[in-house]
Amino acid sequence: MTAFVAAATLALSGCGGSSGASDASAAADGNGMVVGALLPLTGTLAYLAPPEVAAIKLAVNDINAAGGVLGKDVTEVEADTSDGEHADQNTSAAQSVLAKHPSVVIGPAASGVVKNVYKSIVAEKIPVISMASTSMTLSGMDPYFFRTVAPDAVQGAVMGDLIAGDGVKKLAIACFNDEYGTGMRDIILGKLKLAGVDVVYGEQDAFDPAETNYSSIASAIKASGADATLIISYDQATPLIKSLASAGVDTHRLYLVDGNTVDYSKTYDAGLLKGSKGTIPGAHVDDAFLAALKGTGTEVSDTTYAAETYDAVILSALAAEQGGSASGETIQKNLASVSGADGGEKCDSFKACKALIKDKKKIQYSGKTGIGAFNKNNDPSSANIGIYEYDDKNVNVFQAMQSGDVPSE
Amino acid sequence: MASTYRFTAARRRRGAGWRHALCAMAVIAVVCLWCGLSAPTAQADEAEATDKCVPTAEFGCVNGILQGSDQKPIAGVTVTLGGAETGETTTGDDGTWAFKVADDGKYTVTIPQDVAKRYGFASASADVEIVKTSFSKQRGVVRFDKTSTSDAASKPSAAASGMKRPATTDAADTSGKPSASSATWTRFCQQLYSGIVFGLLLGLMSVGMNLVYGTTGLSSFSHGEQVTLGGLMAYVGTQMLHMPVVLSAVCAVAVGALTGLVQDQLIWGPLRRRRVGTMQQMIVTIGLSMALQYLYQFFFGGDIKGIVKSVPEGIQIGPITTNAPALICAGIALATIVGVTVFLYCTRLGRATRAVSDNAALAAASGINVDSVVRIVWTLSCALAALSGVLLGIYLNGIAWNTGVTLLMLMFAAVTLGGLGTANGALVGALVIGVVADLSTLVIPSDMRYASALAILILVLLVRPQGIFGKRNRIG
């Protein structure tokens, strides 16, 4: 089926007509593939932006070094979406990227922002590939919406097991009132109930994402008598952890999620977090990848969602290459196939995969994230969750990787 | 089979003794072959006991931690696995145990009955289902100390007299009850205290805003950014220039004061001279607020900046847990507000300020240089805002590009509650808001706590439209 579509598209473009695509995408004006990027350069998620910026640059460099897509260099346009609290900025960023006629849009990072912008992009038949939006409600939302990160169900299950397996009896949850936060909390709660962990604070309570004063939350957690604390937030965790420490809560038994499992060595006194644990979806990327990211000239200190971003760009470029056109429709039709949904030869770089495509072979791109092919919901069919533990320098050190299938119901 | 059991137990005990284990395995394999047992089938049904188990594509995990209700690990207890695969292990020194299982299916984990009885567990066995590829089922965590059933469990265990465990849990239970009410009292004091500290800081923030309103009639929306500026400057001082906190704070306040002076010279002064209305000026402050926010973000990034890295040692004062920086911040805030009050009531310049505040035209007619008073007020207001930003950044453990703007509405509420344009109104209003907001978390969710404070604002305004300290406007 996919092969037929690919052949048909090839035939169409071969006829010399300005392609059947109704949208004015890049292939039509013959300028090569344009990758649009919607990134949280400002706002509460801005701390996630540097690895994403670097990953897009790196991916585009790698693609162009391998001869580009369909013989032409790939170009990148990016716009700042800010965060979910700035809905006007979300939509204006989407419009500014759309104005450049992208073949594909990478991003946005936050689930809430995705919901604000995806409709205007998919309406022009341009695929949206988010690298960091993990809300469960996005699964199978639109045929043109993809993501290279596993939904929260997966990380929640791993976190629930981690907490239960560590023998926590009374858990306090400091969760922010955001789709990501409460969604993740509910999944973890389900797991904890099964294992018999008591949630003594935060089963219902959630704090405002714009909260500044954490002392009352910290004293409530202290008063609850919890022996461990789970923090589900973005960088609200930075002041929250200090407030918890000041209130006398044990900061060696904290559990952090992907939104806040970052290197705190420059933030706190050594030893504050020793023994605390965190989970981050995605493969633990090697030092070579980090070095390559740094080589793009962007200041990168960690690699959160860098691999997901990189793979999103490579997958869309391969989809264009296989489909023979850089139009949004072609990319959408070929994304699942190049990710390996119907099997094929494995390849791990754009260059290798492109060579296989040239030989008319089916491919299965196994990239930096280690995710499986897109499933029917356009989620990765399988994924990895890394478990990290803080050392005495407050650095999150990789401990173990848990992998499995992403539920598609 | 029996020999393999022994092997798994031996391996569990040895932990890192890999080589020994391998040797043992080889010996056992030889023995098994010699006995004529078919090794492959025995292995298929055998769950491997390990120290730690991480699920992979090939293996699921059944693991857990055995501990008493006091969270003390119970070591050396035999844990038996039944179901699709079977196995046996003993709990480690930290109470943990784990099996690697290759087959999907249902498993039953059992501990000896007498152990379950001794520790008052509800049940000595538990069922889990393992599906290797499913994230939610690839690991089955089994705990026998389920707290949800601990009430039911403690009763039969208490009946089994002569055991030393139930006695201790009973003692904990009885001592637990009276402590419940004292815990609420402690919590009340703690919230009251944090409310007062936050109220003092909010008061310090709002004082400057109220002074500006009093003298010029302008509600400054960019006051929040002046607060942020103070915090960020202190961050620059401590973390980027590695200066001591006090010196950084002084510099931050100086920068704040300077921006106030420059602002009045460049923007507010000319606008006043051109007789631009306060409404228009207010819109200018809104624009300035946005511009400054994004300017801060451009230079400092979107993350929360900690002014001090260290976590201070906790101090216990009666029922309240606090720390030295919080007390010092509150003290400085209070002293500064008192200082400003003294300045307004006891100095010549202060009296002139109040005169301008009451009636600028009359003050001008009586020989007061209104323009220079306003300039001083702007400078003072921005300096106070910067100081409050520093204290806030220390007390709240961080300052971000948007900290000021998130507190702006609370500042307006405090000022309105206390009485717009009055000297002490801001402090009292801020204290009311801080205390009510924090105390309300005892009954309502914490993300709704400012709603309660703002409800108080509405109630007070219904009764006293001019605010607590405000003067009723005379007509005619």
Image: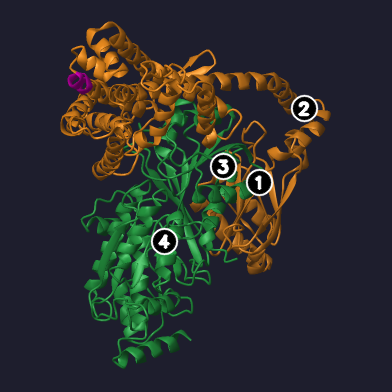
- The kind of secondary structure element at disc 2 is loop
Q: Amino acid at mark 2?
A: Met
The answer to whether residue A298 is above or below residue B121 is below
Part of the protein shown in magenta: B370-376
Amino acid under disc 4: Val
Task: Tell me whether marks 4 and 1 sit on the same chain.
Answer: yes
Q: Which residue matches tag 4?
A: A117
In the rendered image, which quarter is residue A6 located in?
bottom left
Q: Amino acid at mark 3?
A: Asp
Magenta stretch: helix, strand or loop mostly: helix
Tag 4, which secondary structure? helix
Residue at 35% over, 83% down: A357
Mark-to-mark CA distance, 2 and 1: 29 Å
Q: Closer to the N terminus: mark 3 or mark 4?
A: 4
- Measured Cα–Cα span from mark 2 to mark 3: 27 Å
In this orientation, does residue B56 appear? no
From the image, tell me which residue sits under label 1.
A193
Decide whether residue B40 is among the magenta residues. no
Chain B rendered in what hue?
orange
Crowd band around label 1 with a 10 angstrom C-alpha radius: few (<14), some (14–19), many (20+) = some
- Mark 3–mark 1 Cα distance, whole angstroms, equals 15 Å
Q: Residues at badges 4 and 1 in contact (C-beta under 8 Å)?
A: no
Q: CA distance from mark 3 to mark 4?
A: 40 Å
Asked if labels 3 and 4 share a chain, the reply is: yes
Q: Quadrant of the N terminus of chain B?
A: bottom right
